[in-house]
Image (cartoon, rainbow, N blue to C red):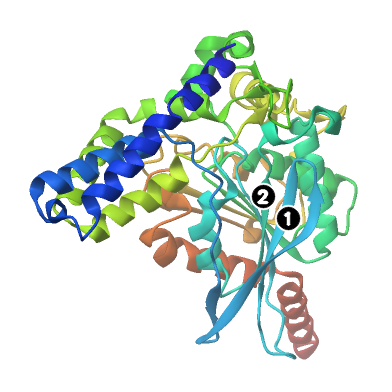
Amino acid sequence: MFYHIYELSHAAMQPYRALADATKLFYSNPLNPLSMTPFGRSAAAAAELFERTTRRYAKPSFGLESTVVDWKKVGVQERIVWKKPFCQLIHFQRDLPAGRRADPKLLIVAPMSGHYATLLRGTVEALMPYAEVYITDWTDARMVPLADGRFDLDDYIDYVIEMLHHLGPDTHVMGVCQPSVPVLAAVALMEAKGDAMAPSTMTLMGGPIDTRRNPTAVNKLAQEKGIDWFRDNVIMRVPWPEPGFMRDVYPGFLQLSGFMSMNLDRHITAHKDFFRHLVKNDGDSAEKHRDFYDEYLAVMDLTAEFYLQTVDTVFVRHDLPKGRMTHRGTPVDLTAIRNTALLTVEGENDDISGIGQTKAAQDLCINIPDDYRVHYMQPAVGHYGVFNGSRFRAEIVPRIVDFISSYGKAARRQTQTRITRASKTKA
């Protein structure tokens, strides 16, 4: 019933949001003399602040219409190249000249943890000049009819494998945060079968591979509460008239409340500053606030089975680092990974995935050759800074680009050719 109450309260606020919109328009209209006064700007600011804190934020768009390749600006078009009920694969197709050498194919697996894939807009934008970028665009579970079936962690892994098959050989895969575990599992399963479509490289960023290392508040909560508490307290049914009516989900609004409560003082201060910027007519600062919270407050529901299986497998039982994780009854054997190069990236101040949790993949994948593995810890960034922001663009992106360029199959063949030629010369 809690989900129904949330929906009813949101509907009940609609007239007041409309009134707030009208108030803002009245006091910000340049034809109104009060719009030039502190009182008028304060009234408009208060109205906008009320409307923004009570609205439901729609799924944002990527809005990436161009990039720079070879020092030239080129257009970019979003193409859906693969689709299933719970996910679609978006290709950011660049308008490149015919005959130009092909760039590496990079599959970015976005988190399915409450926010939309557009949270990685900056990640995509920073990597587009160097690669053909594809990203998983996960579907809000409340928008998927019950007739389309279940979706759990095993299905997630299947989706990753299917997308790698769709993209073909010599693809590079990147798991950002939560997907690090299913991406690592998918690669292990593919390597164990001798799958020719196994990725050339795997980049894991800020992921919970082993949450026993430097556990954060999020990790400790899962350990303290146990899976039964989550099943009893956070799983709800989608209300009518949503397409996913009667589907069991972990609601996005509930997860958002958890996100915000972790840094509540910071969010309150940000909204106070937003009000002051509006009163002072500081348009640039106010727009930055709008852009950030338009993204941050847009959330999606997760299927109950996916959420509970992930919490239980990753955060409660630690099945992957203990060697106990299975996929549809098949053991996930990380020692089977021999040919996929591994890059792990962590943030010094990450309060979601503590230092060492992602690096654990390096210790678990013991059969990857030493010269096919790299670990990097970025100083002075938190969780978000691992995949976005100025330090990401300046210090992490060059390492990712160099890594996938160095360990693609074409680069490996060239290295082997050089080694062979050198051996013949010595002989």
Residue closest to the eye, 396 or 110: 110
Residue 64 spot, x, y in % from top left: 54, 67
Q: Residue at x 63, y 67 (%)?
A: 404
- First in sequence, mark 2 or 1: give its number: 1
In which quadrant will I find the C terminus?
bottom right
Horizontally, is 11 left or right of 42 in the view?
right
Name the mark on residue 156.
Answer: none
Classify mark 1: helix, strand or loop: strand
Answer whether residue 169 is visible to the viewer in this image.
yes
Q: Residue at x 77, y 86 (%)?
A: 421
Q: In which quarter of the image is residue 260?
A: top left
Q: In which quarter of the image is residue 106?
A: bottom right
The amino acid type of the residue labelled 1 equals: Leu
Residue closest to the eye, 298 or 358: 298
Answer whether residue 335 is visible to the viewer in this image.
no
Q: Is the C-beta separation of discs 2 and 1 under 8 Å? A: yes
Instruction: List the residue tagged with mark 2.
Output: 137
Mark 2 and mark 1: span between their CA atoms? 6 Å
